[in-house]
């Protein structure tokens, strides 16, 4: 039996990336942070597992509890985020090839949307996305990037999804 999941679809990853870039208030996003944001766009119910919840997000605690649990169970989230990385890399390379993300930013390990217009049908789909209307989506794309990412108190540690022990502590 074949089972489809968007986490294994590079075209869906391209779409999620454009959705993020078209709706975020941030000019650019570090690639490692992008990988985490994309993971949470796929699995928003796992936002509940960020511990301790950063003070900046405590006002969203009730919202997080309202996100429904999916049918499938998530046993090894670290493995899933690791398996997403090659798909995300291919998606970013596709966007670079189409000149939809900036090459110079990418060389600086950031992604930034260019002025290159999207095809009308794709733009309409992104603008009318149900996910983009969700408060949890806005939390992911606008609030999570404002929180310290690395180190002992950063999102990497709090999520338990990425290695943080070798990060330089920001002051």
Image (spheres, helix red, strand yellow):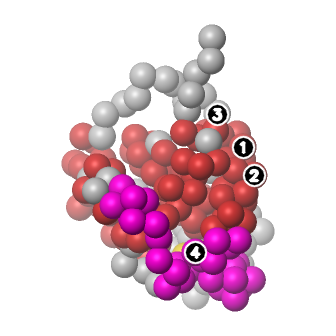
User: Please, what secondary structure does the residue beneath circle 4 have?
Assistant: loop
10 Å crowding of disc 1: few (<14), some (14-19), many (20+): few
From the image, tell me which residue sits under label 2. Answer: 86
Answer with left or right where residue 84 lies relative to residue 159.
Answer: right
* Residue name at image x 32 percent, y 53 percent: 129
Q: Position of residue 122 (x, y in %)?
A: 43, 59
From the image, tell me which residue sits under label 3. Answer: 76
User: Which is more foreground, mark 2 or mark 1?
Assistant: 2
Q: How far is the residue under mark 3 from the one under mark 1?
A: 11 Å
User: Please, what secondary structure does the residue beneath circle 1 have?
Assistant: helix
Asked which quadrant contains residue 57, the reply is bottom left
10 Å crowding of disc 3: few (<14), some (14-19), many (20+): few
Q: Nearer the viewer, residue 101 or 154?
A: 101
Q: How far is the residue under mark 4 from the one under mark 2?
A: 19 Å
As for residue 107 lying within the magenta part, the answer is yes
From the image, tell me which residue sits under label 1. Answer: 83
Task: Evaluate if marks 2 and 1 touch, with contact meaning CB atoms under 8 Å apart.
Answer: yes
Residue 80 lies, with reference to residue 125, above or below; the image says above
Q: How far is the residue under mark 2 from the one under mark 3?
A: 17 Å
- Whichever of labels 1 and 4 marks the residue nearer the N terminus, that label is 1
User: Which is more foreground, mark 1 or mark 4?
Assistant: 4
């Amino acid at each position: 039996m074949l089972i489809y999941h968007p986490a294994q679809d590079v075209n869906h990853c391209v779409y999620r990336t454009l959705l993020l870039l078209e709706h975020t208030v941030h000019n650019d996003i570090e690639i490692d942070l992008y990988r985490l944001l994309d993971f949470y766009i796929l699995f928003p119910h796992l936002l509940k597992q960020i511990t301790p919840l950063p003070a900046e997000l405590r006002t969203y605690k009730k919202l997080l509890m309202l996100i429904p649990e999916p049918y499938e169970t998530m046993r090894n989230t670290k493995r899933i985020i690791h398996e997403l990385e090659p798909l995300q890399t291919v998606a970013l390379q596709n966007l670079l090839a189409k000149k939809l993300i900036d090459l110079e930013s990418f060389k600086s390990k950031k992604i930034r949307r260019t002025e290159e217009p999207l095809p009308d049908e794709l733009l309409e789909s992104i603008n009318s996305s149900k996910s983009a209307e969700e408060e949890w989506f806005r939390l992911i794309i606008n609030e999570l990037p404002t929180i310290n990412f690395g180190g002992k108190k950063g999102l990497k540690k709090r999520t338990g999804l990425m290695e943080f022990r070798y990060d330089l502590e920001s002051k």
